């Protein structure tokens, strides 16, 4: 059987399983979505948000890209962020990276990857700022995993710098920002950072409202 056909058959089985447990599952889901979480994760196929968190459709609004970046020029990301914060009123934003991230490893190298090079430059900048801390980890894989953690923290700071987050913090005291890392070797999530609404930010990044 062709692999794509297997996906369609699996979908039918999944639908039937949901209906068996709750006959109105999809009818209720179709009415509206009220997710409490925005997930900003890596595109890596081994880290599906709903699967690793044990959540159901409708619980997580998500955006995924290479190495879970919050890039100030990424219109797609900022559109998702605006919709999640301003319209869905999410209370939590989770930036989730993962150990063994190919994007982070690529950023540590001097190889050329075409258009991806421009995307990875932000991670290279994070490495440059924390070079001593990263190199102190020893071998390449440990250095890469340390940079994964530092990259997650940098993306939380990038969220803080947006007008979207600053406005929501001032007017509604939400959302809380979380930095998590996923270990593909054991399937466990670990909380690394938590940033409360209203956490101070250097004035050069602050907007007036």
Image: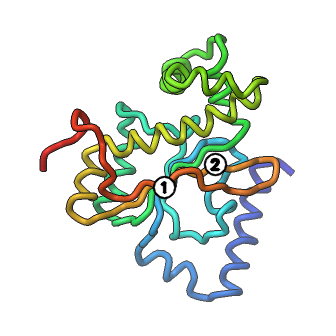
What percent of the width, then of the height, locates residue 2? 82, 48
Q: Nearer the viewer, residue 1 or 80?
A: 80
Whether residue 145 is situated above or below residue 30 in the rendered picture: above
Q: Nearer the viewer, residue 108 or 48?
A: 108
Disc 2 or disc 1, which is closer to the eye?
Answer: 1
**Mark seen at residue 47:** none
Residue found 45% across the figure and 69% down from its top: 36
Sequence order check, earlier mark of 2 and 1: 2
Q: Quadrant of residue 149?
A: top right
Give the alpha-carbon distance from disc 2 to disc 1, as whole Å: 12 Å
Q: Nearer the viewer, residue 167 or 32?
A: 167
The answer to whether one can see residue 119 in this image is no
User: How many marks do you count on the picture?
Assistant: 2
Whether residue 18 is situated above or below residue 142 in the rendered picture: below
What percent of the width, then of the height, locates residue 175? 37, 61
Residue found 65% across the figure and 64% down from its top: 53
Tag 2 secondary structure = strand
Q: Which residue is mark 1?
A: 194
Residue found 62% across the figure and 36% down from its top: 148
What percent of the width, then of the height, locates residue 110? 64, 11
Tag 1 secondary structure = strand
- The answer to whether 191 appears left or right of 126 in the picture is right
Q: Quadrant of residue 113?
A: top right
Q: Which residue is mark 2?
A: 181
User: CB of mark 2 within 8 Å of CB of mark 1?
Assistant: no
Q: Nearer the viewer, residue 192 or 54?
A: 192
């Amino acid at each position: 059987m062709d692999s794509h056909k297997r996906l369609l058959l699996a979908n039918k089985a999944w639908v039937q399983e949901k209906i068996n447990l709750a006959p109105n599952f999809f009818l209720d889901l179709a009415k509206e979505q009220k997710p409490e979480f925005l997930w900003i994760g890596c595109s890596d196929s081994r880290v599906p948000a709903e699967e690793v968190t044990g959540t159901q459709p409708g619980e997580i609004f998500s955006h995924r890209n290479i190495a879970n970046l919050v890039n100030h020029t990424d219109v797609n990301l900022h559109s998702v962020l605006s919709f999640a914060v301003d319209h869905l009123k999410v209370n939590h934003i989770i930036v989730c990276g993962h150990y063994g991230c190919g994007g982070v490893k690529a950023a540590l190298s001097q190889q050329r990857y075409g258009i991806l090079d421009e995307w990875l430059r932000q991670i290279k900048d994070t490495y440059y700022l924390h070079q001593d801390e990263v190199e102190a980890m020893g071998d390449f894989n440990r250095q890469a995993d340390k940079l994964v953690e530092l990259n997650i923290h940098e993306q939380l700071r990038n969220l803080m710098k947006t007008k979207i987050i600053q406005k929501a913090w001032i007017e509604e005291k939400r959302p809380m920002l979380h930095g998590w890392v996923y270990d593909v070797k054991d399937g466990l999530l670990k909380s690394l950072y938590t940033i409360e609404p209203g956490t101070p930010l250097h004035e050069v990044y602050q907007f007036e409202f």
